[in-house]
Image (cartoon, rainbow, N blue to C red):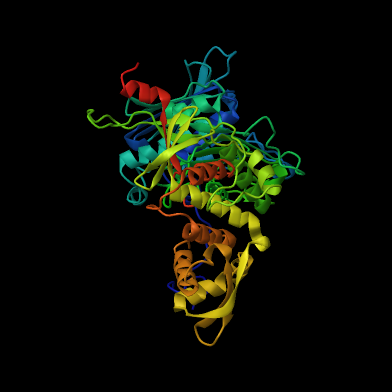
Amino acid sequence: MCYNCHNMSAEAVIRKLSPQVIGKIAAGEVIERPASAVKELVENSLDAGASLISVEIGRGGLDLIRVSDNGCAVAPEELALAFERHATSKLSNETELEQIATLGFRGEALPSIAAVADVDMLSRHGDDAGGHMVRLRRGALVEEQTTGMAPGTVVVVRGLFRRQPARLKFLRSPAAEGGQIAGVVSHYALAYPEVRFTLLADGRLTLQTPGSGQLRDAAAGVYGRQVAEELLSLPADEETTAHPGWEGASLTGLVGQPSLSRANRNYITLFINRRWIRNRSLAYAVEEAYHGLLMSGRYPIAILDIRLPPGEVDVNVHPAKTEVRLQREREVFAFVQREVRRALSRQAPVAGVSTATWAGAAPTPVRLSLVAPKDSASAVPAGRFARAPSGEEGEQASLSPRLPVLRPLGQVGMVYVVAEGPEGLYLVDQHAAHERVLFERFLRAGASADRQGLLEPAPVELSPRQQALLEETADALEEQGFALEGFGGRSYLIRAVPAVLSGEDVAQAVLEFLDALGREEAVSDRRERVAMSLACHAAIRAGQTLGQEEMRELLRQLEQTENPRTCPHGRPTMIHFSADALAREFRRR
């Protein structure tokens, strides 16, 4: 049997592939779809220093792709050479491969595109009287001539994959392929806000950015002005986002406040040294920064540029350069998560209602507004709400913006606390608010958590699922004050529980707590899972009546938390009716 292939006869011989076949195989690695061609051409324009890039497509890029720029042109004598494989002006030796500062460097983009489409390329230096054009068909040069044109470079691609019908079968509809192209142009418009981008699809303007150099302006061109205005800036304050102890590492960008969530991860845009990349680990770092601030199944908007020393990043791991390998990925993960979380803690506003429907009035649309948080006074003890411990907790709270000082007025339906603040009226979900207070307290308490020992151990029989949860989170449960001792099979003796559970039927409380713990499976941190379940179980419930002093203390303790705007599960703790909205509804304005 021939060792080259099980399905070939013994007469099969090894032969060298023709240049045409080699070119098409290479093109398949680099040019997977029309968006791949647009990406490569836009990267060339950016590497050429263009300040204006125009992309025009016809039928999702299958009929036409035209990329024009005003960047540094290609010399007439080098135009044909640009279509030779591995011909590039961006790399000259092996040493430079370890310090790549350009988006392109392989010299494969133009020959790969020419292998699967008809290509015209025109280029003119600013000092030249005219431009020069080369025309390629089936990857071969067929025409070369001078032409009139503005300074810069234009690449026209027609009939992509027309001669490869097998490739066409795997593409989506022209509209879907056009959407992929819009995504590519959008990403680079966000990475290079100083460049003016224009995208025309079948003669229709679908994207335009001003090229002002401001990321927020570029975000407005991509996502719309309203979304851009609600994004939070990194760095979060005057402090730098440079990585401590890592020279040359920093983070800048915009992140959405928790109320600005989306149903998928497509709005998390990551750049490393302004190169658009896909990296599941870093995208997860962004999601983790929103942990406890977003509902399950919701994802943030984020535009982040991570700057790293070139030697720390290997960009030569994927033909399309969409994946990179990081030398210190764990440190980058922690850095991104910490800085995004800090921006959210210091800047995220309180969600509120600016227009409400009142009894006797015609229904009006509900719109969300934002209220900047204000400083508040310290908490005082009252009723069932114990005093928040001093020291570390107070220092932690001082690092983040607090809520406005709120004065309780009463309850609505024994569910919401009605409070007055400097900016209007607030409705506070008493359970969500108390849950946030307890969650942060339990997390901070750690091994010092209050424990209530039982005079007589309480027996309890666990289900297989409850037993697995108990064993999985044993350390975190012990840290919070649980002490359960095995008594054979799935039977256990409860010897101690957290103080917040001591007044209940202990066995039933433990069973309910373990059931709640099972519902927090999406939370990877075991300490947080236990703290969330314990806080949910111990928090005051809807339907409980609170006295005036208890409501006041709940609000004061909420003000002291690190993230007072949401419960640990991401639900809002309050909504706000602004003074302006109230005045309008009562026709005082």
Quadrant of the image occupied by residue 81: top right
Position of residue 39 measured from the top left corner of the image (x, y, whole percent): 49, 37
Residue 11 vertical placement versus 23 (above, below): below
Instruction: Give the left or right position of residue 161, taking residue 347 as reference.
Output: left
Is there any visible trace of residue 159 in the rendered image? no
Position of residue 187 measured from the top left corner of the image (x, y, whole percent): 49, 36
Residue in the picture at 44% in, 63% down: 519
Position of residue 148 measured from the top left corner of the image (x, y, whole percent): 47, 15
Position of residue 113 measured from the top left corner of the image (x, y, whole percent): 47, 40
Residue 395 vertical placement versus 238 (above, below): below
Instruction: Give the left or right position of residue 43, taking residue 326 as reference.
Output: left
549 or 104, which is in the foreground? Answer: 549
Instruction: Give the left or right position of residue 161, taking residue 144 as reference.
Output: left
Is there any visible trace of residue 390 in the rendered image? yes
Q: Quadrant of the C terminus?
A: top left
Residue in the picture at 27% in, 29% down: 364
Count up the numbered dots. Answer: 0
73 or 313, which is in the foreground? Answer: 313
Give the residue at the far bottom of this rendering: 488
Residue in the picture at 36% in, 21% down: 583
5 or 14, which is in the foreground? Answer: 5
